[in-house]
Every structure is written in C-alpha cells, then in structure tokens.
Image (cartoon, rainbow, N blue to C red):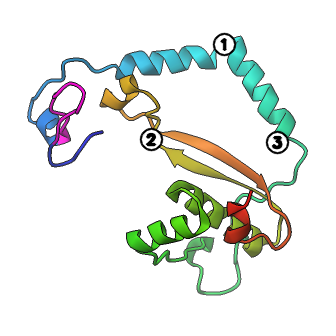
Amino acid sequence: MLRGAGGTSSSTGQNLSVIYLLKGGRLERDNTFGILREEAEYRKSDLFAADMKYFAGICGGTNWTTLPKQDYITDENEDSEHYEGFSFTRDSVESLSGKYGLGKNDLYIAACAVALSAYNDSDDVMFTWTWDGRADAVRLKAVGVLIKYLPVALHLAEGLTLSGCSKR
C-alpha cells in the first residue's frame, strides 16, 4: 500500500512513499507496465469475449436505472445534478457495518442501491463502483494507477432495506 507521508512494504522493507519516489527514490521493481500489458492482452482474448457475452446475457434485457432522475424544474439542482451529503463518520460506518453484518464496501454499495431504487422508484439498479485494482502481491507493490470501475447491477425486492440486504 502506498502512503503519502512515508512507509515501507512489510514484505520487502522497501520504502513505498509517493513523496520518496517524487524525490528521486527508486523501487527495486515496478510491475505496472507488465500488469497493464497483461490486461490489454486479456481484452483482446477469446476469454474476454466470452466473459462479455456472459455478462450481456445476465444483464441484458433489463431496464436498469443508473442515475438519479434529473430535476430540471427546481433551483435546488444546479446543472441538473443531484448532490446529497453523506454525514456518517468513520465510526458510525463501522458500527452500521457491524450491526447489519456487512463489510464497509458492502454497506456503501447496499446504501447506494437502496437509495437509487427508492429515489427512482425502480427495482433494477445499476451503477459503477471504484476499486483500486490491487488483488495480488504483484499489484500491491505496483506504483501505477490500476483503478477499476466495476459494474454493480442489482434487482431489489420491493421495500428492501439495509437490514434486508444483510440477510441476502
């Protein structure tokens, strides 16, 4: 994991501070370009085509709601965008996660899905979730940006709440 102010990799003792790198420090090895090349090759493969066909099959044909409905009438929505504050503290998110038996990411995903479903009055919701793309040791040590945008598509039963999400 990279730290803004400093830190070392627990596995190699290697300094992984972004500031360290910006000041000319060197990594023993950065696999970012190899990782990106591997991902580009996957996108050209038959396996990727099969994966895309699979997801099109399970997600296609549904009238997904993907964004909050636009409010073009009131003055409360500048540039037709919808903003809502999320005033939970880190402690309250951890408390809610424990209460409902969800991980923190699961809690945010469930809250987003339930809110989008209620706001748009739709049981089928789809949105994008951002993930850092670091699933293995090689990617954990890479400095490059490996951010992935994962599609989340859910069919929510009518009246589903966060409590109901934790039971599924």
Q: What's the residue type where badge 1 is placed?
A: Ser
131 is higher (above) or lower (below) than 39: below
Q: What's the residue type where badge 3 is placed?
A: Cys
Residue 107 screen position, x and y as percent: 57, 62
Residue 35 screen position, x and y as percent: 43, 20
| Disc 3 to disc 1: CB gap under 8 Å | no
The magenta-colored residue range is 7-18
Q: Which residue is mark 2?
A: 132
Q: Earlier in the sequence, mark 2 or mark 1?
A: 1
Is residue 148 magenta-colored?
Answer: no
Q: Which residue is mark 3?
A: 59
Q: What's the residue type where badge 2 is placed?
A: Asp
- The local secondary structure at tag 2 comes to loop
Q: CA distance from mark 2 to mark 1?
A: 23 Å
Q: Name which quarter of the figure residue 150 lies in.
A: top right
Tell me what residue is drawn at x 40 percent, y 15 percent.
34
Residue 89 screen position, x and y as percent: 40, 74
- The local secondary structure at tag 3 comes to helix
Tell me what residue is drawn at x 91 percent, y 44 percent.
61
Q: Earlier in the sequence, mark 3 or mark 1?
A: 1
Q: CA distance from mark 3 to mark 1?
A: 21 Å
| Disc 3 to disc 2: CB gap under 8 Å | no
Q: Which residue is mark 1?
A: 45
Of residues 141 and 78, which is closer to you in this image? 141
Main secondary structure type of the part rendered in magenta: loop
Quadrant of image for the C terminus: bottom right
